[in-house]
Image (cartoon, rainbow, N blue to C red):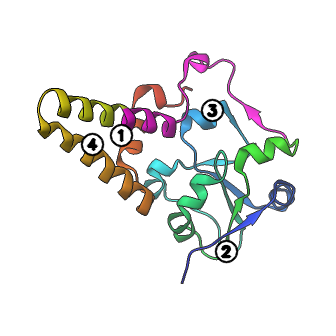
Amino acid sequence: MTAVLTELDPRAVADRLKAGAVLVDIREPNEFAQAHIAGALLRPLSSFEAAHLKIEPGRDVIFTCGSGMRTGAACARLTAAVDGEAFVLRGGLNAWKQAGLPVQAGQATAPRQDTRPEGVMRQVLLVAGLLVLSGGALGWLVHPGFFVLTAIVGAGLTFAGASGICLMTRILALAPWNRATT
């Protein structure tokens, strides 16, 4: 059986939330702290299986992320955690905002609110790019053995794309700057 997340537009999600549906945000804590939909449960994709999603049977479960890309890429992982049909907010938080629906902004009292970096996925792209550039430059200038670094990064990104499991994301999510402040 193929895992499928049924897409819902923002207005349909808002109606289902009023009727008792559960919204699960799979972004990382720093992204969630910046802005999220009121009442959403935070279950970061980088540690999703460890989060043990506990939803009462019979309740609609709707997943969301920033743009809908992560939910689509992790469809099998997300639907495996739900008994019954699972839904996704088409376009994620971006579409929710564009529809003029309310979001909760980051906590103004969080001491590091203004210094938080972009999402973990952007950090993954930055680190992967730097590793590939470094491996290429060192392989060309120092020793060809450094080209192995670019192959390892490429293999890791390929595995992450195919499986929805990114080791680099999990490691970066543990960094102190990516932890939500209380």
Q: Is residue 61 left or right of residue 112?
A: right
Density class for disc 3 (Cα within 10 Å; few <14, some 14-19, many ≥20) is many
Disc 1 marks which amino acid? Ile
Residue placed at 22% from the left, 41% from the top? Answer: 149
Residue occupying image coordinates x 75% and y 61%: 21
Cβ atoms under marks 3 and 2 closer than 8 Å: no
Q: What residue sits right under mark 1 in the picture?
A: 171
In the depicted structure, whether residue 132 falls above or below residue 115: below
Structural distance between the alpha carbons of marks 4 and 2: 40 Å
According to the picture, the residue beneath numbered tag 3 turns out to be: 33
What is the secondary structure assignment of the residue under circle 1?
A: helix
Do we see residue 49 in this rendering?
Answer: yes
The structure residue drawn at horizontal position 51% and vertical position 36%, both measured from the top left corner, is 122
Q: CA distance from mark 4 to mark 3?
A: 34 Å
Where the N terminus falls, by quadrant? bottom right
Crowding at mark 4 (Cα within 10 Å: few <14, some 14-19, many 20+) = many
Q: Which type of secondary structure does the marked residue at label 4 adopt? A: helix
Closer to the chain start, of discs 3 and 2, is 3
